[in-house]
Image (cartoon, grey):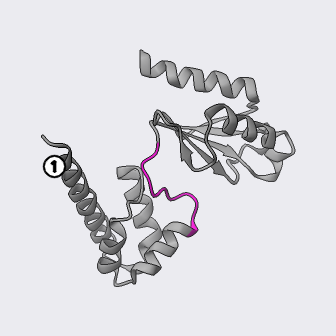
Amino acid sequence: MSQSRTIINALTRDLDVAKTIAGHYGNKPDALLEILHDLQHQIGHVPETAVPVLAKALNLSRAEVHGVVTFYHDYRREPPGRHVIKICRAEACQSMNANALAEHAQKSLNVKFGETTLDSEITLEAAYCLGLCAMSPAIMVDEQPRARIDARGFDAIVKNLKAEKLA
C-alpha cells in the first residue's frame, strides 16, 4: 500500500472515531471535554482535522473547539512518542528540586515540555500535580506514577524505556 493511501486511511479512521465518540455523547456541546478526552485516549492525540468534524457534530464553531483543545495543556495536537513522561511542576515538587529535574530531563532528552524526541520514543510533558506531594519530586511514566525521582533515577528510567525497544 502506498504512503499516501496509508495516510488517507488513517485520516479517515481518525475522523470516523471523532464522529463516533461525539455520537456516543449525543452530540451535546457540553460534553466537549469528555469527547476530546476519549478521542485522545483512542488515537493518542486530537488531530487538527477532527476539529471541524467535532464542531459540526456539536453545533459549535471551529474556533470554540480549537480554543478548548489549545487552552487545556493535557490535549495533544500531535501524536506522542512511544512513551510519555510527565514531570510534576506543582509547588510541593518544586520545593523538592523538581525544577532541577525538569532542566535535566529537557537537556538529556534534548526536548522542551510538549515535545517528542527525534527518535519518537519519548514525549516530555509538564503536569501540575500528580498527587504524590509527600513523595516529591514525582513523575508519571506511561500513566504509572514514580516518586522521589532525581536526575540519576530519571536517567535509569529513560535507559530502561529505550532498552524495552531493543528487547
| Front position in the image: 30 or 13 | 13
The chief SS type of the magenta part is loop
Quadrant of residue 12 in the image? bottom left
Where is residue 148 drawn, in percent x and y?
A: 76, 32
Q: Is residue 132 magenta?
A: no
Q: At label 1, which amino acid type do we have? A: Arg
The magenta region covers 71-80
Q: Height in image: 62 above or below 150?
A: below
Is 120 drawn above or below residue 53 in the view shown?
Answer: above
Q: Where is residue 73 shown, x and y percent of the image?
A: 58, 60
Decide whether residue 76 is among the magenta residues: yes
Residue sitting at 66 percent across and 24 percent down? 155
Find the residue positioned furthest to the top: 167
Image position, residue 150 (x, y; %)? 76, 29
Residue at (43, 72) in percent of width and height:
32
Q: Residue at x 41, y 55 (%)?
A: 40
Between 105 and 153, the one lying in front of the other is 105
Q: Quadrant of residue 11?
A: bottom left
Quarter of the image that includes the C terminus: top left
Residue 38 left/right relative to 13: right
